Image: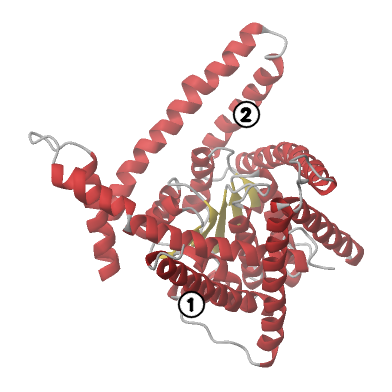
Amino acid sequence: VKFKGFLTTTCAIVFGALVLAGTLFGHNADGTLSLLGELQQLILNVAVILAGFAVLVGILNLLLVHLKKVRLKQKGAGYSIILIVTLVATFLLGLLAHYIPMAASLFSDTFQFIQLPVEKSLMALLAVTLAYASMRLLRRNLSLVSVIFLVTALLIMAGMAPWPFLGDEPFLSGVIRPWMTRIPVVAGARGILLGVALGTLTTGLRILFGSDRPYGGKDG
Amino acid sequence: VTGILQGLVGLGIILLVAAIMVGMAALQRKSPASFRMIPAFTRLRSAAGRIVEGGTRLHVSLGHGMLTSPQSGASLAGLTLLGRLAELTSAGDQPPIATSGDAALAILSQDALQAGSQASVPGKYDPTTGRLTGLTPFSYAAGALPAILDENVSTNVLIGNFGPEVALLAEAAERKNSLSVAASDNITAQAVLFASAPEPLIGEELFAAGAYIEAGPLHAASLRVQDILRWLIIIITLVGALLKMGGFL
């Protein structure tokens, strides 16, 4: 177990350092890829292939989770049966699509007429959820920041679409909304993104130090 | 030549940050720093204790940030928090569960859960507790909903890269009267979580999780380094603005 931990940590540090070096010194003066750049590309390509295999493992895990639900007759087991049947059917259609044109058409129809409408419905549900959450915000957390958040959201929404019976409100759509989206919103967003970038930098460094080991190297 | 110069500047910044971090970690061991109180982490720590006592379950949702993308930072911060929370709650009757929208992240979450369970009861680990629930943002959210609603979850931690679909998860947690601590690196998701989650974490607070749940001295050192760098950026921005106003730039 200790050797496994040592091996995974060493791999993570070495490959992390190589990818970082490739990012910093990946190009020669004439714009072509340097040796470090080529090495970085190679490592990233291998990572993409591994990620592809990880999807297969993940889907197998999804299947196991739902088979367990059906076996133990847990709540929602009926939905799990539907998931398993559709998963197997889509997988088979995907395999057959390379050989049978009708299967290829069915395969693309599955996404166009089932997956997309279901995701669009969830998006519509999201709009209602957000409207409801905004209404509850003041009740749950009455503070100056919450009031500013809601007033800003309302002003930007009011400036985005024409008002019923009134049409465009030029002061909101031409002055307030552009000013808000150009100055305070951009300033706030940049501040937050700078903080996120600094956090990402220190997280990356902890992994390069071998201090954070989210890859099974903990016992080493 | 410009590219190499930029690379050297980048390397210099990284080495400087690394040196400050190591120095701060050594300082942290001698005199531990105290950080401002973030209510979400205080509630999360007490919730972890209640999970063990109450026989309920912890759910950590890690989002769908791919590890080969720039969003991996948020996912890795989520994995660190998952590992620590798994250790804290593994003595309970019901093991914690982790849901994610990226396959590699799901595999790593299984590793974190396994390490957490081995810390208390070796051999107790259940591989179905680390799950891939969907590969698109909405299918991921739809797949994670049953975990929140049907699996006796009392605390939800939504941490990682999400889009607006995270509101569906926060809303489900609210309906079950369970605590939800939520953080994302995505600006849209942060706005959505501010409205829908009772304990949202804003901006870099996402990366502070490790320091607040005592995941190690380097986490606390990271926070101090982030503060130093933030002040440096503020000074550079102000000096730059003044120079621009004075016509020197």
Asked if residue A82 lies left or right of residue B169, the reply is right
| Foreground of the two, B151 or A37 | A37
Percent across and percent down for residue B215 are 65, 74
For the point 42% across and 50% down, which residue is it?
B188
**Residue B218 circle label:** none
Q: Rounded to the nearest whole Å, what is the CA distance between mark 1 and mark 2?
A: 41 Å
Percent across and percent down for residue B67 are 67, 49
Q: Is residue B214 visible?
A: no
For the point 58% across and 43% down, which residue is it?
B133
Q: Is residue B104 above or below residue A67?
A: below
Percent across and percent down for residue A4 are 88, 60
Q: Secondary structure at mark 1?
A: helix
Q: Is residue A51 visible?
A: yes
| Foreground of the two, A7 or B7 | B7
Instruction: Write down the residue under mark 2.
Output: A87
Q: Quadrant of the N terminus of chain A?
A: bottom right
Q: Residue furthest left?
A: A165
Which amino acid type is shown beneath numbered disc 1? Thr
Q: Quadrant of the C terminus of chain A?
A: bottom right
Asked if residue A22 lies left or right of residue B42, the reply is right
| Mark 1 chain | B
Q: Are marks 1 and 2 on the same chain?
A: no
Q: Residues within 10 Å of mark 1 (few under 14, many from 20)?
A: few
Which amino acid type is shown beneath numbered disc 2? Leu
Instruction: Write down the residue under mark 1.
Output: B42
Q: Secondary structure at mark 2?
A: helix
Percent across and percent down for residue B62 are 58, 54
Quadrant hosting residue A174: top left
